[in-house]
Structures are given as C-alpha cells and as structure tokens.
Image (spheres, helix red, strand yellow):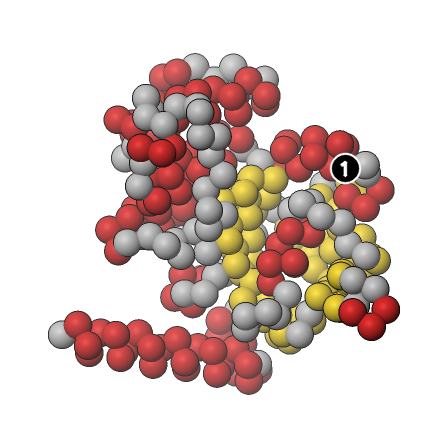
Amino acid sequence: MKDILHMDKVTKSFGKGRTEVQALKGIDLRVQAGEFISIIGPSGSGKSTFLTIAGGLQSSTTGTTKINTVDFNQLSEKERSKVRFKEVGFILQASNLIPYLTVKEQLKLVDKINKKNINQGKIDEMLDSLDILELQDKYPGELSGGERQRITIARAMLKKASVVILDEATAYADPENEALIQEAISKLISGKTLIVVAHRLNTIRNADQILVVADGKIAGCGTQNELLENCPLYKKMWENYSDAVTSKTKGES
C-alpha cells in the first residue's frame, strides 16, 4: 500500500540565535492510504506545528514532507496552496467558513473549484446524513459552534481530499453537538486517511497509530494497547484522563 503522507527528518525552528526555539526535532512518519493516525502530547509539545507542516500550511526548516510524492518544501507558497486545496481537508477547532456565503454557497464553491459538478441532490443527501439539510440557506453567523463544525465536515466530505486533518474538532461543542460531530466524523473517515490531534483520549482508542509527541520529538508510537505497555508518558496521560472522567461522572451523579 502506498504512502499518502511521508515526513522524513522534519525539523522546525522559530527565531534565530539566542531566541531560537526548535519546535520539531527530527520527525519521521509514514501514513498509508486509509489509516487513522492520532497525535497526542502535553501542551507545548509541538502537536500544532506538526499538524500545520503535515498539512502544508507551513514548510519545515529541514527535512521533507510529501503528500502523494509531492514535496511541499520544493514548492512556492502559491504552488503549495494549490496542492493543499486539492489534497488536504482541514477540520479545525475554529471552523473557517466564509462569513458572507450561505452554507449552500460554501459547498458550491468547493465543488466549483474541484470541478466535480456534483448535482444538488447528492449534496442534499450528504447534508441530510449530517442532520444539517435545513441549514443550507443560513450564514455562518446564524449557526451554533457545533453546526458550523458539521458544515466544515460536510465541506471536507465534498472535497474528497487524500488526507483529512482534524484538530480537536469537538473541543468547544456542547454534549449534544459533540455526539453529532463524532457521528459526522465517523461518516467522513470511512475509507479515508485521517490525522487527528486529540485531547479526549477516548476518541482515538481505535486509531491504527497513536503518536505521542513530547518536546518536539515522537516519544512513542503504536496502538492503544502497545503504548499502555511500552510508553510511560502515554500510560500517565491515559490514567490522568480516566481519573478526570471518573471524577466528572461522580460529580454529576
């Protein structure tokens, strides 16, 4: 099976001289088509920088990042933007919808740029599956945070990107919308290559690979069971998460 994403000896530094900060320190990663990859780690560990480089939002200082054999570091910003739009779907904490376009217009724009000419019936079917069909004539400012996230997911589904990147998509959702967003994501990821940054560890237990990032390096990589056995940092994070969930459940009962 071919690599969809290949990061080789990737580093990223900010600043120069005495103020230089090295956010990533030699990251190696191969992601194959259809894999579900999760990135976790303490705050400030380099997760966000990792994500922006993997998705082509910025270039690395050294090393290579390839999506379908295209090396982002060899492209101009304009070329990188074109490849990024074609190959990568983003679902971020803050949904990046265009404020002056209705939901229907947002999706039509993606279809127009992709030149897929998907008929409205197919779009309606997708919106209905995400329980947002009745929202298509509304503007982003008229939607709740959870509704905007589901529109962003619909846009990623329509795009049919090689890689879908999620950055804690349910971070600010209320419990009802969190369940709907998780259901929408489940529909989105069927057969797709997915990279997720998560804080709620229960959402990534079934990942094909979980990467534990600490101090700009990969401190552990494997399945949930492998990391619980072999990665002290992941085991500690899982125990802390489980304790927090237990405490919250007791407080609500």
* SS at mark 1 in the image: helix
Which x, y percent locates residue 138?
Answer: 32, 26
Front residue (pair 198, 191): 198
Is residue 40 at all visible to an observer of this figure? yes
In the image, farthest residue toward the front: 18
The C terminus: image quadrant: bottom left
17 horizontally vs 50: left or right: right
Hey, what amino acid is under mark 1? Glu
Identify the residue at horizontal 55%, vertical 84% (top origin): 232
x 48%, y 61%: residue? 198
- Depicted 55 relative to depicted 133: above or below: below
**Percent position of residue 7, x then y:** 74, 55
User: Toward which corner of the image does residue 57 lie, by quadrant?
Assistant: top right
Does residue 145 lie above or below 124 as drawn? below
In this rendering, is residue 157 above or below 2?
above
In depth, the one of 160 and 156 nearer the eye is 156
Say which residue label 1 marks: 77
Question: Looking at the image, is 19 positioned above or below residue 180?
Answer: below
Direction from residue 7 to residue 153 in the image, left or right? left
Q: Residue furthest left?
A: 253
249 relative to 20 in the view: left or right: left
- Category of crowding for the residue at label 1, using alpha-carbon neighbours closer than 10 angstroms: few (below 14), some (14–19), many (at least 20): some
Residue 199 at x, y = what percent?
A: 45, 65
Q: Is residue 84 left or right of residue 60?
A: left
Q: Is residue 1 visible?
A: no
How far across and how far down the image is residue 2, in percent? Answer: 70, 46
Q: In percent of the image, x 30 and y 74: which residue is there?
A: 245
The residue closer to the viewer here, 70 or 175, is 175
Instruction: Identify the residue at horizontal 26%, vertical 79% (top origin).
Output: 247
